[in-house]
Amino acid sequence: MPITPTKKIWMDGTLVDWDQATVHVLSHGLHYGTGAFEGIRAYKTPRGVAIFRLREHMERLIRSCKILMMDVPFSVDQLCDAALEIVRVNELDNGCYLRPLVYLGYGEMGVNPLPAPVNVAIAAWPWGAYLGDEGLEKGVRMKISSWQRHGVNAMPTAAKGTGMYLNSALAKVEAMKAGYDEAILLGPDGRVSECTGENLFVVRDGVIISPPPSEAGALPGITQQTIVKIANDLGYEVRFEAMIRTDLYLADEAFLTGTAAEVVPISSVDDRVVGTGTPGPITKALQSIYFQAVRGERTEYEEWLARV
Ligand code: PPE
């Protein structure tokens, strides 16, 4: 998806012009994937633009960096302030996607990451529906990938590490080239893990189920947690439970969740139609409340919004 340039990018504490926000080609992160990132969305609300679950995202970024032993020279508060500032100075009043990135910079070569400088950047730009407007509305066609999600001792799946996305990119390309919208990855034990940039849920007999992130080797999703809260508030039973691919084929409903993707119905998995093949009632209810929450139309979820 193309990037729409905005005016400024926050880099290590200063605002840099969009076109000047460059790094040296010998930056460590470019060679070895040594970095961690976040994806955050801000939405237009009746009381101005607000960033959704900002603090939770910045806290996860710091946790990712702890796992990867990168000392971030900024606090969660400073990162949150920087994110608010970048939305403000770029006048992104209609909402945007934010991309905080911690990466090992220029000055050291060789795999040992410890001596390399830790750099931080936050960019923001308007970004449309990640899996398309039609996907949001009608659902997406999924394919189980022949690529396996990392085992938890191959890659730290609780971290949103930049290099880990090679695995996602391979799965995404395979699925797209085969004519599908998105891939579902299984872990080394054959259980369902997650998608290339989203967590996954199924609905069966009125119960909402998602693979438990630690066991499934999936990123603990903030949207996943958001959906759990909304579903509980609606009175649904939600379980974190391991699942296998046929659980997807036999689900009444299925959907995926992620900050970029938002809440997207799944219409089929490996050409097996899920439910009726159109978004089911529970998926639609959760999706609609999610959009109301991010857009500041639900007072009970106000605390999730950081006003710019
Ligand atoms: N799993 C993966 C692998 C993942 O990348 C994401 C977010 C999630 C689950 C959902 O997490 P959360 O956003 O906290 O609900 N993927 C981000 C990056 C997407 C991209 O293409 O870049 C995102 O959604 O911003």
Image: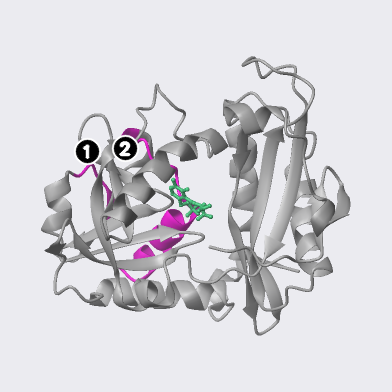
Mark 1 neighbour density, 10 Å: few (under 14) some (14–19) many (20 or more): some
User: In this image, 244 relative to 230: left or right?
Assistant: left
Residue at the location (55% across, 81% down)?
297
Mark 2 neighbour density, 10 Å: few (under 14) some (14–19) many (20 or more): many
Quarter of the view holding residue 27: top right
| Count of marks placed on residues | 2
Residue 230 appears in the figure: no
* Of the pair 28 and 280, the residue shown nearer to us: 28
Residue at the location (37% across, 31% down)?
150
Upstream in sequence: badge 1 or badge 2: 1
Residue at the location (59% across, 26% down)?
32
Kind of residue at badge 1: Arg
The spot of residue 189 in percent (x, y) is 22, 30
Which labelled disc corresponds to residue 191? 1
Residue at the location (22% across, 76% down)?
278
**Mark 1: which secondary structure?**
loop
Residue 64 appears in the figure: yes
Instruction: Tell whether position 177 is magenta.
Output: no
Q: Which residue is mark 2?
A: 216
Kind of residue at badge 2: Ala
The spot of residue 139 in percent (x, y) is 30, 71
Quarter of the view holding residue 22: top right
Distance from Cα at disc 1 to Cα at disc 2: 7 Å
User: In this image, 136 relative to 43: left or right?
Assistant: left
Q: Is residue 16 above or below residue 12?
A: below
Which stretch is magenta?
215-243
The spot of residue 82 in percent (x, y) is 79, 54
Specify whether tag 2 is near ligand 1 (CB below 8 Å): no
Q: Residue furthest bottom?
A: 46
